[in-house]
Each structure stands twice: as structure tokens, then as C-alpha cells.
Image (cartoon, helix red, strand yellow):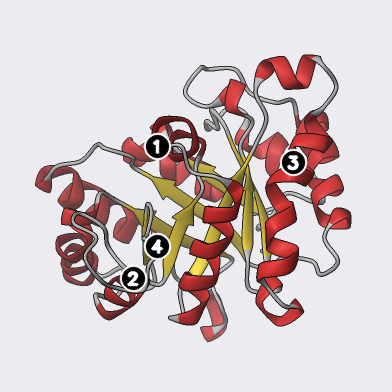
């Protein structure tokens, strides 16, 4: 029986500080051949794919996708500045990213929070900056293993989400994508079970006064566990790390969003 698409799912590749020109070409060619960004009957694709390479590769990747014949795949940044412009050496503004062809931006990834000391207040400001310039923000939230074992997951996530309630209005919240990435599962090989992930996603969806555009799961998503995760009713797709660097694995994960 042929597969029919669910309401448009979202799969985002976070390449982190990995990449090369060879990877750009390989990924673009494989994604174009897979035709995941195409849709039957001229409708919207069943899965929206977003690639977030390191900043120097944004423009070359855009060119590679067009050359390979995969124009429906969109580009995102891995971070942006909370400042609109000014004397901030090394930072990149939302306006610059939008002007360069980006359409999405990852904000508040746990590695930014732990390695760079970003606060939830800063991430809320960054979300607002992204929206000001037409970028769709992908806000990352998640708890540590100690916090999960202590039973404070919902409390921690509530604290991370709280600044959004004052920084954004209802119309802005509807444009927001939230990625739940349990810190204990990022790059560790451990993954929240589908039941654990669904429970947290349902909590997030009902915690906010206005539902976000989409809720993604991230944390060691692989072809083997993606179908069970994406089958859960409150999981709209994934934010993919290591598996997004292997074309065959990433394509398999994207296909897992198609439900029979």
C-alpha cells in the first residue's frame, strides 16, 4: 500500500562544527536523487527538510542544492546574535542571515547554553530577532540526566520556556518551532523512548498559551528509532545531529516521517 503524507513534517539537520565542500556536494546530490523535497500533484512536500551547516558553508550549500536539483530544501543557521547590529566581532545578525538566503535558525542549543553560557532570556531575545527578519526560529530546550532522575524535567523546561511568554505575542508563538533535546541523549547514543518523548512533547504543547508551529525531537535519532519516535502524535519531526552527516541515514530518517 502506498504511503500517504502526514501533515507536513519537519526534519532539520544540525551539522554542528562538521562539514566540507565534498560533504556539501554529496549531500545535495543524494537528497536530490531521493526527491524528498518533491510532492505529488503539485501540493506541498510531505516533509520539509532544513539543512543547518556551519556558516561558511551556507552559500556554497545553497548553490549545490540548486545545481543538484533540490531547490525545495531550505537552509538554516546554527545560531544568531541577540544584537541587531554593531561592534560585536564574530557575531552574525538575523538580518544578515536573512539577507544571505537563510530561512531558519537554531537557537539555544544545549551546547550554546553549556559552552557559551547562554541564558533562557538571551535565547528569547534571539527568537524575537529571528522573527523580526522573517527567519523561523528552532528553539532548543532540554534537561540533564540528573534533572530527569530528580523528576524535575517539566520544571526545567518551564523555566526555559518562561521568557518566551513575555518576549513574544501569540502570533509570534505560532511561528516558533521547539525542539526537545534531552541533554543526556545528545551525541551519547542514548535516546528517550517514544513514550518518554511523547510525554514531554505533550507537556510542552499544552504548557504554552499558544501552540507552536511544530515540536521536534532531538537526541541520537537514527534510522532504527526514527519511525517509532515520529509515530507519536505530538512529535512533528526531528532535529538530527550525527546521523545528518551520513546521507543514507539522514534520508532514511526523513522518510520515517511518512506514515502508512
Q: Distance from label 4 to label 2 (Cα)?
A: 21 Å
Task: Identify the residue position indicated by label 2 in the image.
Answer: 102
- Nearer the observer, disc 2 or disc 1? 1
Q: Secondary structure at mark 2?
A: loop
Where residue 118 sits in the image (x, y, percent)? 48, 43
Is mark 1 in CB contact (under 8 Å) with mark 4? no
Q: Earlier in the sequence, mark 4 or mark 3?
A: 4
The vertical placement of 115 against 125, above or below, is above
Is mark 3 in CB contact (under 8 Å) with mark 1? no
Q: Earlier in the sequence, mark 2 or mark 3?
A: 2
Residue 4 shows up from this direction: no
Mark identifier at residue 35? 4
User: Crowding near pointer 1: few (<14 within 10 Å), some, many (20+)?
Assistant: few
- Nearer the observer, disc 4 or disc 3? 3
Residue lying farthest to the bottom in this orientation: 42
Where residue 154 sits in the image (x, y, percent)? 83, 36
- Nearer the observer, disc 2 or disc 3? 3
Where residue 232 sits in the image (x, y, percent)? 79, 44
Mark identifier at residue 260? none
Q: Distance from label 3 to label 1 (Cα)?
A: 19 Å
Q: Earlier in the sequence, mark 3 or mark 1?
A: 1
Residue lying farthest to the front in this orientation: 87
Task: Identify the residue position indicated by label 1 in the image.
Answer: 116
> Who's the residue at 18% across and 43% down the image?
23
Task: Give the side of residue 256 with respect to residue 103, left or right.
Answer: right
Q: Secondary structure at mark 4?
A: loop
Task: Give the side of residue 189 with respect to residue 78, left or right.
Answer: right
Q: Distance from label 4 to label 3 (Cα)?
A: 36 Å
Task: Identify the residue position indicated by label 3 in the image.
Answer: 157
Q: Nearer the viewer, residue 212 or 245?
A: 212
Amino acid at each position: 500500500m502506498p504511503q500517504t503524507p502526514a501533515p507536513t513534517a519537519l526534519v532539520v539537520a544540525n551539522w554542528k562544527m562538521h562539514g566540507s565542500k565534498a560533504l556539501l556536494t554529496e549531500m545535495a546530490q543524494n537528497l536530490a536523487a531521493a526527491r524528498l523535497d518533491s510532492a505529488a500533484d503539485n501540493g506541498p512536500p510531505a516533509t520539509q527538510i532544513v539543512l543547518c551547516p556551519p556558516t561558511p558553508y551556507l552559500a556554497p550549500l545553497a548553490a549545490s542544492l540548486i545545481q543538484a536539483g533540490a531547490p525545495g530544501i531550505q537552509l538554516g543557521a546554527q545560531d544568531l546574535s541577540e544584537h541587531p547590529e554593531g561592534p560585536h566581532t564574530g557575531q552574525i545578525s538575523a538580518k544578515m542571515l536573512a539577507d544571505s538566503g537563510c530561512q531558519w535558525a537554531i537557537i539555544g542549543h544545549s551546547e550554546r547554553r553549556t559552552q557559551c553560557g547562554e541564558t533562557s532570556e538571551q535565547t528569547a531575545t534571539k527568537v524575537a530577532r529571528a522573527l523580526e527578519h522573517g527567519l523561523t526560529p528552532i528553539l532548543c530546550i532540554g534537561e540533564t540526566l540528573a534533572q530527569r532522575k530528580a523528576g524535575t524535567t517539566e520544571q526545567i523546561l518551564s523555566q526555559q520556556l518562561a521568557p518566551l511568554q513575555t518576549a513574544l505575542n501569540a502570533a509570534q508563538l505560532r511561528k516558533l518551532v521547539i525542539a526537545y533535546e534531552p541533554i543526556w541523549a545528545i551525541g551519547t547514543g542514548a535516546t528517550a523512548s517514544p513514550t518518554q518523548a511523547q510525554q514531554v512533547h505533550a507537556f510542552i504543547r499544552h504548557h504554552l498559551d499558544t501552540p507552536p508551529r511544530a515540536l521536534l525531537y532531538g537526541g541520537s535519532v537514527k534510522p532504527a528509532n526514527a519511525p517509532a519516535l515520529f509515530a507519536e502524535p505530538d512529535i512533528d519531526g526531528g532535529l538530527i545531529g550525527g546521523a545528518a552527516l551520513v546521507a543514507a541515514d539522514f534520508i532514511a530518517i526523513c522518510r520515517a516521517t511518512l506514515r502508512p
